Structure formats: C-alpha cells, structure tokens
Image (cartoon, rainbow, N blue to C red):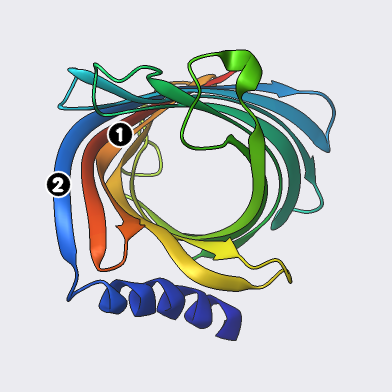
Amino acid sequence: MKKILISGIVPLFFCQLLLAQEYDKVEGIWNAVFVDVPLSDKLSLRSEFHSRTIDYFGIWDQQIFRPQLTYTDSKKMKWTFGYSYLKNFNADVNADPRFRNEHNLWEQVSYNVPLKKGLLSTWIRLEHRFREELPLQTDRSLRSFDFSSRIRFRFTYERPLSKTEAKVPVNFVFYDEVFSIMSSGGTPFKFNQNWTFFGLKIKLNDKITINSGFQKNTIFKSEDNYLKNRLWNTILFYKI
C-alpha cells in the first residue's frame, strides 16, 4: 500500500510544478484501436493503431503503430516488451518536410491491486527513442537519428458504475501519467509531459470494449513554456 500511495503523490507533485508556467493551448481528437491476440495462458500479442489531431479533425498531430508482447506473471503482475513507430506532424500544415519519424523500443512492468469496489493499477515504461534530428532535411537520405531515453509512470483507478449482472458493464476510469527524460547516466532528470484522463470503460461483449473520455496533455516546450493539448480520447479494444 505504501508503494501505491507514493505512486499517487508523484504525479501530484509534478502538477504543482506546472501551476506558474505559461501555456499555449490546442484541442483535438485521439482515436485508437487495440487488437489483442492470446498466444497461450501466459503470453499475448497486442497491436495498437493511433491517430491524433489538433484543431479537432483539422490538423494531423501524430500517428502511431505499436506492436507488443506481454507475459502475465500472475493476476497482479505483467511484463511487456514492445516497439513503436511514431509519425509526428508539424502543426504548420505548410511546413516542408511536414513530419518527423521516431522509432522506439520499450519495456514495461504493470501491477494491479484489486479493491472491494474497483481496481488500482500502476505501470512503469522505459522507452529507448530514436528520433530524426532537427532541423529536418528535405532530402531523406541526409537525415539522421538521435538517441534518448524516457521513463513513463501511470497510475490508474477504475470503479464499476453498473450492477454486477449488467449485460453491458460500465466502469469509471481515471489515470495520471508522468513522463521524464533520462540523463546519460540513466536517471530521470527533466520533466517532459503529464497526461490526465477521466472517462468511461464500456464492455460491449467478450470481444469488444470501448474506453472514451476527456484527456489533457501538458507538454514541456521550452523554459517556462508548455503546451496544453485538450483531447477527446476513444480507444476500441478488440480481442481475437
């Protein structure tokens, strides 16, 4: 329980650090599809497909493809290894080149704590990022990649809203996630992002679940300047 309390305090600490900063603001839509394929009692494969916009549906912001393999150690603990390809778009639609490619490898451990009514869960993800160096070159053969690492921590609370016997169970979901850039020595040293989400989880049947709700991303841009991205986030989970 001490670990869970610490996990909840860390995101709140980062939020306090951001109160006095200057912000740019945008609004957008984040849609995603997660496809799950059980391989055995312990192993499962997931592929994620994300599309994110700003100015609602007006301007592309990011596209992600993220396959991953998960080993379920117990009912409470899971280990995951994955790869992500990210296409990060310039907000200026006239920019040339318009997008920056990123490849990363990552490892994640997650831990669940069942409650009498609901569920607490945490996960920690370590990302090894290869991003095209700036300024981007129009001639793609001249582009190169830089390397950095980032650690992400997410704390999630989930609580049932419907009755146990409901044909379509509905849960309330809240999570807060903090991103920190890693130093060359392998320790977190610089705030990168904070995500806050609250919404509903709706289980339509044994194969399809939908999460949908409001998300606010606070992103470090430069000293004393941050971007606030307000999103409507919807994820469709499909189990084969």
Residue at left offset 78%, top offset 45%: 72
Q: Nearer the viewer, residue 119 or 234?
A: 234
Give the SS element for disc 1. Answer: strand
Coordinates of residue 119 in the picture (x, y in percent): 49, 59
Mark 1 Cα-neighbour bin, 10 Å: few <14, some 14–19, many ≥20: many
The residue indicated by pointer 1 is: 233
> Is residue 159 found left or right of 136 in the rendered image?
left
> Is residue 94 found left or right of 154 in the rendered image?
left
Residue type at mark 2 is Lys
The residue indicated by pointer 2 is: 25
Q: Is residue 75 visible?
A: yes
Coordinates of residue 121 in the picture (x, y in percent): 54, 60
Q: Quadrant of residue 53?
A: top left
> Is residue 233 found left or right of 208 in the rendered image?
left
Q: Nearer the viewer, residue 54 or 134?
A: 134
Coordinates of residue 190 in the picture (x, y in percent): 49, 69
Residue at left offset 40%, top offset 71%: 11
The correct choice, above or below, for 119 with respect to 79 in the image is below
The correct choice, above or below, for 144 with respect to 128 in the image is above
Residue at left offset 83%, top offset 34%: 41
Q: Is residue 161 visible?
A: no
Q: Nearer the viewer, residue 68 or 62?
A: 62
